[in-house]
Image (cartoon, rainbow, N blue to C red):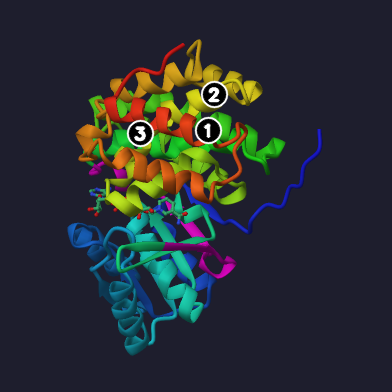
Amino acid sequence: MDFVFEPLPWRVIFGVGALDRLPDEVARLGAAKALVLCTPEQRVMARDVARRLGENSVGIYDKATMHVPVEVARAAREHAAALGADVCIAVGGGSTIGLGKAIALEFGTPIIAVPTTYAGSEMTPIWGLTEAGVKKTGNDRRVLPRAVIYDPTLTLSLPPALSGVSGMNAIAHCVEALYAQSANPVISLMAEDGIRALADSLPRVVREPTNLAARTRAQYGAWLAGASLGAVGMAIHHKLCHALGGTLNLPHAETHTVVLPHAVAYNRYAAPDAMARIAAALGADDAAHGLFDLAVAVGAKTSLRDLGMRESDIDRVADLATANPYWNPRPVMRDGVRALLRDAFEGYRPAS
Ligand code: NAD
């Protein structure tokens, strides 16, 4: 066994009612001018957050949108600068936290993240910005939130269908962490427990979206997943989803959900230890089958065709994913990747 272990400087406040600690977290940073970020749909939630900060809130910026277009980032930075914001409170999913990261990247403004989906951006130093339809990503410690407040109460309103696919997106981070080139034993423990927590809570969350115990367990899994994503490198699954999302503008979490069983089937024989851990955490005989069956159990779509991809796009995405591949336990070969995409396009259950 050999590995490098370098944990990130995370600060996590977790639990039902954890949002009550927000004013203390702002004070802990020595900040007094908090700008609350959100999407237009989450303005009511953001207003409650701003109210809790009283005179330490300078306002709400509610224009966060998927994949952080540069124009949105620019406008948000100008707004933050005009108000003299000294901390951003990002209340929402990966899109809102991504907007906070765009501000932090330019000005170094600290972020307190209040995640309300299971996407995991709050635990990573990875930023993304989209210009003219092309998404650029990078890694910079300045964008890692200084504190993350997980309050499962805030996830009760996440629609069941979105909860299911957002949770599958989180599982994808855990899965790839287990066979990452930079895998290490501590993150692998977290990743495995993340899969276990999400697999047993997501079907309950989808059936009973206001079940706070199930929501708490799902968000616990999402925390572990975000930590896994932030700490070790990702492989073919994330590369494919990046290509599909970036070029075809397919929905983020849904795309992860469809591709994951097929990416795992692709790596099945190249990462046997990881496969055994994934299958055990899912309570399944086979990792790829367990993931496909979980996607079905949460009511997710299982084919890229149903997400709006056209058959003629398969070759384009195969070219993109193999042109500059991420490290992967099984060599990334065009024929194999094309077959993987074909299966995901049709929505087949991965073969044995
Ligand atoms: P999202 O942030 O786009 O949210 C989807 C929708 O759900 C939005 O309309 C949002 O307002 C709504 N929503 C969120 N929480 C809600 C709640 N509790 N109740 C009601 N509505 C709610 O979706 P996402 O999947 O969280 O994030 C996707 C984006 O994040 C992508 O752009 C992806 O690339 C990025 N991402 C980045 C990282 C990273 O490390 N940089 C990691 C994961 C995802």
Query: x and y percent of residue 176 in the render?
Result: 54, 36
Q: Are marks 1 and 3 in contact (CB under 8 Å)?
A: no
| Circle 3 SS class | helix
Q: Is residue 125 shown in magenta?
A: no
Few, some or many C-alpha atoms within 10 Å of disc 2 (few <14, some 14-19, many ≥20)?
Answer: many
Q: Mark 1 sits on what residue?
A: 175
Number of the label disc, if any, that sits on residue 128: none
Among numbered discs 1 and 3, the one appearing first in the sequence: 1
CB at disc 3 and ligand 1 closer than 8 Å:
no
For image coordinates 71% across by 35% down, the residue present is 185
Q: Is residue 93 visible?
A: no
Q: Which is more toward the observer, 233 or 144?
A: 233
Q: Which is more toward the observer, 123 or 259?
A: 259
Q: Is residue 149 shown in magenta?
A: yes
| Circle 1 SS class | helix
Specify start and end residues of the magenta stretch as a single range.
Answer: 136-158
Amino acid at dot 3? Thr
